[in-house]
Image (tube, rainbow, N blue to C red):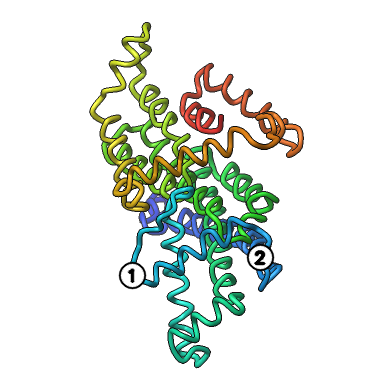
Amino acid sequence: MNSESLATPLPVRNRLKPIAALRSRISAVTVALLGSILLVAFFLRVYGVNFGLPHLYYWDEPTVVQRAIRFGSGDLNPQFFYYPALYMYVTFVVSGLYFVFGMLTGHFDGVTAFASEFFIDPSGIYLWARVTTALVGTVCVGLTFWVGRRFFGALAGYLGALFLAVSVVHATHSHIAITDVPQSLFIIAAYLPLFSIVERGRWLDYLLCGVLIGLGMATKYLAVLLVPSVIVAHYLHQKWQPKTAVQWLTHLFNPQLLAAGAAVLLGFFIGSPYNLLEFNAFLADFRQQSILSSGGGEGTSYLFSLRSCCQRPSVGLCIWRCWRAWCGSRVSSAVQAGYF
């Protein structure tokens, strides 16, 4: 071999082979780790999912499922607005799939048999609805990994997904056909465009974030608490610090923020249209729910959960992250505002 051949550079294809191999190994590790976390998450959510059946011990569950079954009459108006209707519609679709499956397998010979089962032993209907919630809860874990890796690195993604996978509260509520876990799906998904607002501030980010928050509100009203995070993210992207309250209020009429607000209403209308079409009935139920929640029973303070659910370390970490955000890491501020 002469000196000229030694000096000849390797072809580009050969030089890229080690990089491609490294990426392949990283991808394999990602699939293995994330797959393991998702399997654990699904197992914890589906194990014992048939608890209590045919008896029901969580009163919110028949509130959702019974109204979903009523949609089979052709009237999609829930005529009940203590909860928004999106997950009732999802449960209605799942119940329809259960009926079709029963017809194909000979379990049902018609609508009458399906109706009889619902009144005599609705275990099958509730089981399908619960498994749907368990699947949604598992998807939440995957989304948490995606958000964490996208904005804070792979380690944050793995840890976030793992913590949510073994969360007692999230796993418990994933066993029940209610709205809490589906709401968290839209909230977690909304953080992707929310962080993108801070980084890039594209119109698409504002619109997508608004629609996801609206769909979350159409699942459970509490998702509205994420709206202030959009405003925080907008101010962080603009790098503008108004000095007076008038300047703050004036800047709220920014076209992108107004578009995000309109997108929230659109998402809410898509998911639960009768809240707006039957607005007076919605307000009446909302007032009644507020009255029931504000009096007539022994309540607990806001700090009760912090004492009873071991969340003090989480609050301490949150305060520390807020301090870091104040000192320069701007992107995390949107998360902290949403947390509080």
Position of 238 with respect to 138 (left or right) is left
Residue that sits furthest to the top in the current view:
243
Q: Is residue 318 left or right of residue 210?
A: right
Closest to the observer, 273 or 201: 273
Residue 311 in view of the camera: yes
In front of the other: 2 or 156: 156
Residue 228, by quadrant, is: top left
Residue 199 drawn above or below residue 185: above
* Residue type at tag 2: Leu
> Label 2 belongs to which residue?
56
Q: How far from the left and from the top, in percent, is residue 19?
A: 47, 53
Q: Which mark is residue 74?
A: 1
- In percent of the image, x 36 and y 59: which residue is there? 77
Q: Secondary structure at mark 1?
A: loop
Q: Earlier in the sequence, mark 1 or mark 2?
A: 2
Is 311 in front, or is 274?
Answer: 274
